[in-house]
Amino acid sequence: KNQKYIDYFLQTISYIRVKRRNQTFFIHASPSDTFFHIKSEISKAINCCTSSDNDDDDISPRKMRLYLPPSSKSKKNGKIGQGDGDDDDDNGDASSPRGPIPDSAMLSDHDVKNDDVLYVTFVKNLGGDVPEDGDEDAWEKIEVDT
């Protein structure tokens, strides 16, 4: 009976790592959490440490995108990123992260487990409005130091 409880506890309580550039956020999460909830936790972590009294300087979850890692990781110069830097279309090769993940999706929908890694990007103009769908140039590229 105790083992069932322990197994259940281990399945429902977990941490995920969310990476951006040289930052890693450790987020306490459960399988039923939505990706918007994860973005909200990142927002809280970032915004709690700023000294600004202006709410316009806060990084809203709506100005973030989350991505799952690629199926086979590609490392170039110690970094994981999108594309190969030659400005041509890479057409989603196996080394490109999948995403962005819809806010309403749950971690369990994408089989995110304890200690898994996600990537976060921000809108390039944090002071501006949330970009329209399809405006990919308004968002940072994924770039993570490894």
Image (tube, rainbow, N blue to C red):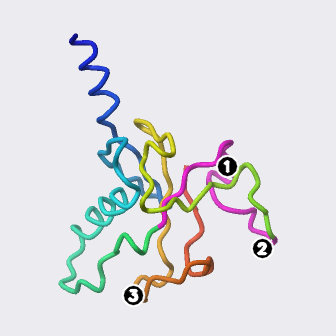
Place residue 61 in its image quadrant: bottom left
Q: Which mark is residue 127?
A: 3
Residue at 31%, 66% (x, y): give it. 43
- Please identify, in this view, whether the residue under mark 2 or under mark 1 is nearer the observer: 2
Q: Which residue is mark 2?
A: 87
Q: From which residue to which does the magenta span run?
A: 65-88
- Please identify, in this view, whether the residue under mark 3 or under mark 1 is nearer the observer: 3
- In front: 66, or 78? 66
Residue at 66%, 62% (x, y): give it. 82
Q: Helix or strand or loop: what does disc 2 sit on?
A: loop
Disc 3 crowd rating (10 Å Cα; few below 14, some 14-19, many 20+) is few
Disc 1 crowd rating (10 Å Cα; few below 14, some 14-19, many 20+) is few
Instruction: Tell me the amino acid under the disc marked 3.
Output: Gly
Q: Which mark is residue 75?
A: 1
Tell whether label 1 touches label 2 (CB within 8 Å): no
Per the model, the C-alpha gap separating discs 2 and 1 is 18 Å
Instruction: Tell me the amino acid under the disc marked 2.
Output: Asp
Q: From the viewer's perspective, is 57 left or right of 126?
A: left
Residue 85: x, y in percent? 74, 67
Residue 109: x, y in percent? 48, 45
Residue at 60%, 81% (x, y): give it. 135
Per the model, the C-alpha gap separating discs 2 and 3 is 27 Å
Q: Helix or strand or loop: what does disc 3 sit on?
A: loop
Q: From the viewer's perspective, is 34 left or right of 49?
A: right
Residue 27: x, y in percent? 32, 49
